[in-house]
Amino acid sequence: MISPQALRARTAKARLVLTDIDGVLTGGTIYHFVDTSGELVEFKGMHAQDSIAMAWLAESGLTTGVISGRVSKGMEARLTMLKVKHIYQHRLDKAAVLAEIMAAEKMTKDQIVYIGDDIPDLAAMSRVGLAVAPANARPEVKAAAHWVTKASGGDGAFRELVEVILKSQGLWDALIAKYL
Ligand SMILES: [Mg+2]
C-alpha cells in the first residue's frame, strides 16, 4: 500500500481508467437463465452510484475501459451508455489487451489506473501506474495493489476510486456545482 499522498500524486496523473467487471463493478454474482429458445443468458447488476461515476470520468475528459473474461450483452449496452470507450469482453489475456489500449491511446504506464479483484487481473495490475483492488479482492490481488478501497466490488469500490481521481485532479467541486 502506498501513502495517501502518493495515492493523490498517482491519481492526479490518471488519463485512462480501466476496470475489470465481475467482482469490481458487480459483487461477483452472475445469474444464469435459459431463454425460451434454449439459449443460456447471463445477467448481473451494476450499482447506480458506480454507473454515474463512470460517466463522470468521461465527462471530465478521462478515458475509460473495461476488460472482462466473460461476455454480457447487457453490460456492454449499459457501459456504452456510460461512454466507456474501450470494451473488451471474453479476454482473460488482460496484459495483451492493456498493451493494445495503451498503443491506441498513446499513453504511458503512469497515466493508467487499473482496478481488479482476481488472479487474471494481476498481469494488468503490474503494468500500470496505479493498481487498485476492491476490499473483496483475493489476498494475492490485494498484495499486488498499490491501494485497496474500503468498499467492495458492486458496493461502491469503483465510486470510491473515481472520487479520489476527480478530487486529486481538482475536478470534484466543479462536478458538484453542476448539480446545484
Ligand atoms: Mg473480477
Image (tube, rainbow, N blue to C red):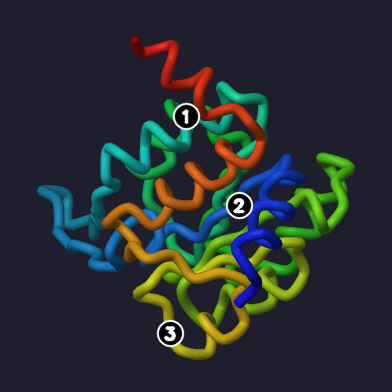
Per the image, the residue denoted by label 2 is 18
* Precedes in sequence: disc 3 or disc 2: 2
Q: Is mark 3 within 8 Å of ligand 1?
A: no
Identify the image quadrant of residue 39.
bottom left
**Residue 171 screen position, x and y as percent:** 59, 27
Q: Is mark 1 within 8 Å of ligand 1?
A: no
| Label 1 crowd bin: few (<14), some (14–19), many (20+), radius 10 Å | some
Residue positioned 23% across, 67% down in the render = 29
- In the rendered view, tell whether residue 9 sits above or below residue 171: below
Between 27 and 71, the one nearer to me in the picture? 27
Label 3 packing within 10 angstroms: few (<14), some (14-19), many (20+): some
Q: Tell me the amino acid under the disc marked 3.
A: Arg
Q: Are marks 1 and 3 in contact (CB under 8 Å)?
A: no
Q: CA distance from mark 3 to mark 2?
A: 18 Å
Specify the label residue 55 is tagged with: 1
As drawn, 168 above or below 26: above
Label 1, label 3: how far apart the Cα atoms are:
27 Å
How far across and how far down the image is residue 3, in percent?
63, 69
| Kind of residue indicated by mark 1 | Ala
Quadrant for the C terminus in the image: top left
